[in-house]
Amino acid sequence: MQFLTTARLNYELMNEATILASIKCMRTPGQTVLSEILSSDRPAEMTDLVHDMAHGTYTRINIHSPGPLSLQYSAQATPTHSLIAGASLTSPHPSTLPAELLPFIYPSRYCQSDRLREVAEEIAGNELSAFAKVSRIVDWIHQHISYAPGTTSEQDSATDILEKRSGVCRDFSHLAIALVRALSIPARYLTAYAAQLEPQDFHACFEAYLGEQWCLFDPTHLAPLNGIVRIASGHDASDTALASLYGDIVGSEVQVCCTSQSPLSPITQDELRQSKTAFVLG
Amino acid sequence: MQFLTTARLNYELMNEATILASIKCMRTPGQTVLSEILSSDRPAEMTDLVHDMAHGTYTRINIHSPGPLSLQYSAQATPTHSLIAGASLTSPHPSTLPAELLPFIYPSRYCQSDRLREVAEEIAGNELSAFAKVSRIVDWIHQHISYAPGTTSEQDSATDILEKRSGVCRDFSHLAIALVRALSIPARYLTAYAAQLEPQDFHACFEAYLGEQWCLFDPTHLAPLNGIVRIASGHDASDTALASLYGDIVGSEVQVCCTSQSPLSPITQDELRQSKTAFVLG
Amino acid sequence: MQFLTTARLNYELMNEATILASIKCMRTPGQTVLSEILSSDRPAEMTDLVHDMAHGTYTRINIHSPGPLSLQYSAQATPTHSLIAGASLTSPHPSTLPAELLPFIYPSRYCQSDRLREVAEEIAGNELSAFAKVSRIVDWIHQHISYAPGTTSEQDSATDILEKRSGVCRDFSHLAIALVRALSIPARYLTAYAAQLEPQDFHACFEAYLGEQWCLFDPTHLAPLNGIVRIASGHDASDTALASLYGDIVGSEVQVCCTSQSPLSPITQDELRQSKTAFVLG
Amino acid sequence: MQFLTTARLNYELMNEATILASIKCMRTPGQTVLSEILSSDRPAEMTDLVHDMAHGTYTRINIHSPGPLSLQYSAQATPTHSLIAGASLTSPHPSTLPAELLPFIYPSRYCQSDRLREVAEEIAGNELSAFAKVSRIVDWIHQHISYAPGTTSEQDSATDILEKRSGVCRDFSHLAIALVRALSIPARYLTAYAAQLEPQDFHACFEAYLGEQWCLFDPTHLAPLNGIVRIASGHDASDTALASLYGDIVGSEVQVCCTSQSPLSPITQDELRQSKTAFVLG
């Protein structure tokens, strides 16, 4: 399915400044990106960087004079996905875990899995399969954490969310990742455009490594999983930040839009949950 | 200079278990490793893994039966170093920072640089060069944090150390890294063998990216910098843990020894500080 | 019922020092104290203080020279109790709460009720009576927190325990109090001698104000409630510390013993729970 | 000197609710309150409560129907003060501290003095007198913490402020109290009306017990100390909250005004600091 994604980010610069933006749709074997344009309303030096952690594109934008700045991005992207029977999916034990997955069982800035072992085991209970454990965690978060913008800050991490019992998509995924990793199951963070997300904004979900692939979960239950267009994957929001600002610059407004170019029959987290199906984003 | 490094790690297994050990000396252009042996006192399946984050060797050790286990490592390694004038060394601004260094200005599990911007700026003051700023941070930590084993746990991070005002080498380096990154200067964690460290143990230091290379600092002032044999480099202790244990296993005892094979004329942190010299480990 | 309580506290002084001890059995209308003796093995200046918060006796002990010190306390005390039907006990609403109970719905050092409102409501669910809500909290703690000495420190508070899922009697009660106050139900901390507690030690429980009296709960389920001899009541461990030390002094060893002078037929927390009975300590 | 203080507090009730307000000027031997009126713009049941902790007046306001509510308070109060030479003022050692001061050396909800001993000693340095130590703490806070509304929340405590390096009057005083108590010097929190505070609002300061009286300090340096009209004294904001809300009610707006009825020649914190003078509020 093809999606049109657009984003407008507005800034106010008091001086020269640098933006590290991670808003371009990721190019993967399963996701083709067409006719992509990132532009600014005044001269800005833009360079695409890729580094080995975030598995996405960082664009460095250097602006040399003060004043307002507006960035405009639009792209057409065609994510693909597959559905597989989840119920018996296991996770590789650390005794056989491929080396490249190790970073995803370690704790990270916003996902202190080392501090949440007891809570994770309590929530996962005595489920046998890794898929069942991860599903229990996603369900628990959906039931116990309120989606409430404004209740958390960018410095809040999994342990804060567990206490506050509220947050936004970023927080839901951080908590999920911390709990999943606490069970030694690899988990990573994903930033995305999301069709049918209301209101439209950037979105965050997470993937757990089950069977032999990364399976996508949305603990907020807010966006159809087949409407997700991947921007970046990483440890957590620390290495997938949509925009990091350096210099005397403040962000003012963000407008995001993601629409499918043909009718989208939504595949929801709830539906996947009931049918014990795993969703694999291409 | 050539060093003989040895380590003995003893464990007690109640069942089969997996150890991910990162205790082998790193092989780099500047550090040759000779006659290396890692052995166990009973059958264990050992595989060397390298993953892209830790920049060192992980050895996966799977043991299939309960009982005591002793790992013995010994190697001869020849780290090299160079000394360069530090005073005017700058750090690449985010507007020009090479992509592969980006991960080292982000916050990580034990180095919450995003929460320590004000403190970092206060400590660094109005120093002009990045070297001078990092030196101020190293000095501040040396003066304000007490080296006191037993006062911190493996879950303590930079913000905890800042409050407790005490810790061990791991804690000193975590705090230093958090403060350095808070100034947008890349910093990474280093685990090591260390000659003339008293008492002998594994050691942790940190490197800041100054000029065009990683410069080594030891905020504990406990080990000569030219006695450091690098094991691994990473974000922090989360991806350079000396040994991560999976299964029903507990560690009992660690013995470490690092000796230079010819007399070592120590280059100390204090000396480097006074002469404003940067130490670059090969 | 009459109990014999004894405590021996050993210290090592490097210099003169002051101990504020709160180990004497409380004298209340419902608890008579007989033949009480607090003595030291060398000259010490002892003064009993009572202040309006702790509702117990503080003994100030000034010692003017270095060396070992041993304090020995013994008393005979006769706590009384009553049992009342709990199921429908309510708690006074803030609109009618007597002024002297206000301090017990506020957050305190180790009981940050202001941060646990969501968790408390989730645990208490839609129970109608205050007794039922408090019982749900006590049950939840008993089921979800492991009694594990050595896993917490004296600086840990309710929010830490909630994360660690383990602790000792002090921690269990701090978490219970924080959750109960978060529902605007007054709760206070109680230190005690406890017959049939294994192994013998000082104990901590908590009281919730239900109906028109303070009702005692032991979320650890470790001591019979009719074996409790009250020492002090307060906000939390901050104002009921068994011994606060000032000067160059460290504690070495504590021996506690509480025995009933006639056979004690234990009334357990579990039994009270099943019969929905409230236990009121005299 | 006589002051006119007024406060208007606006609320929106979705249902019946209770407000515990602590906004009346305190009546003390040194502060007379004249012509005091607390009224509401629609029927509300008001009762004055005094409890032994806050040392001020709590007014319980029960409102039985939904809708907007406006409370209006006005009073004339005549605080007095004295100035005494501070330099050599000491603080009673715990070995002689009067019992009623004990609660003010214990940690409390927002002032975790038990966690800040090392930081406090570092800041106070080797000053000899308690006055000099407290002054060093007040100076340090004034220099290192930015006054920045909006950077902290009502759940932030002394340890948070120390990390964030910013806050409002409440936060400045919490940090000061925690540090002062960490040195075993009694400290308490004070809420107030404050003439010449810009912009006008409720204010918070703190008092340390030096010599044989409570001495007032304003670590924000924002209000003349002789323009302070005391509302309440307590452990911290937990027992001196200006308004605690119970029920389905939210606050909307607060307007405060405090004016001296004859010209006020301001006595500033900075002036007191330079002249090493202690300010004692009557």
Image (cartoon, coloured by chain):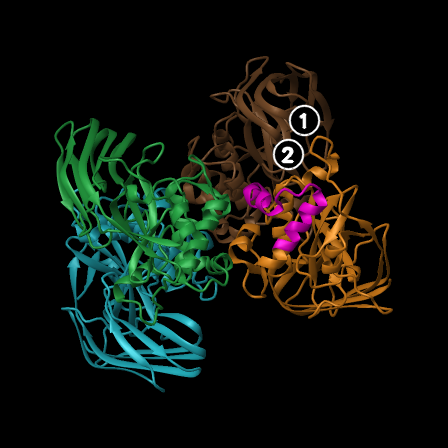
Chain colours: A orange, B brown, C green, D cyan
C52 vs D22, nearest the viewer: C52
- Which of the two discs, 2 and 1, labels the residue nearer the N terminus? 1
C73 vs A127, nearest the viewer: A127
| Residue contact at pointers 2 and 1, CB within 8 angstroms | yes
Residue A114 covered by magenta stretch: yes
**What amino acid type is highlighted by mark number 1?**
Met
Q: Is D227 drawn above or below residue C153 in the view shown?
A: below
**What amino acid type is highlighted by mark number 2?**
Ser
For disc 1, the chain is B
Q: Which residue is the site of mark 2? A: B233
Side of B204 where C28 appears, left or right: left
B19 vs C170, nearest the viewer: C170
Residue for point 55% across, 33% down: B205
For disc 2, the chain is B
**Helix, strand or loop at disc 1?**
loop
Residue for point 44% across, 75% down: D249
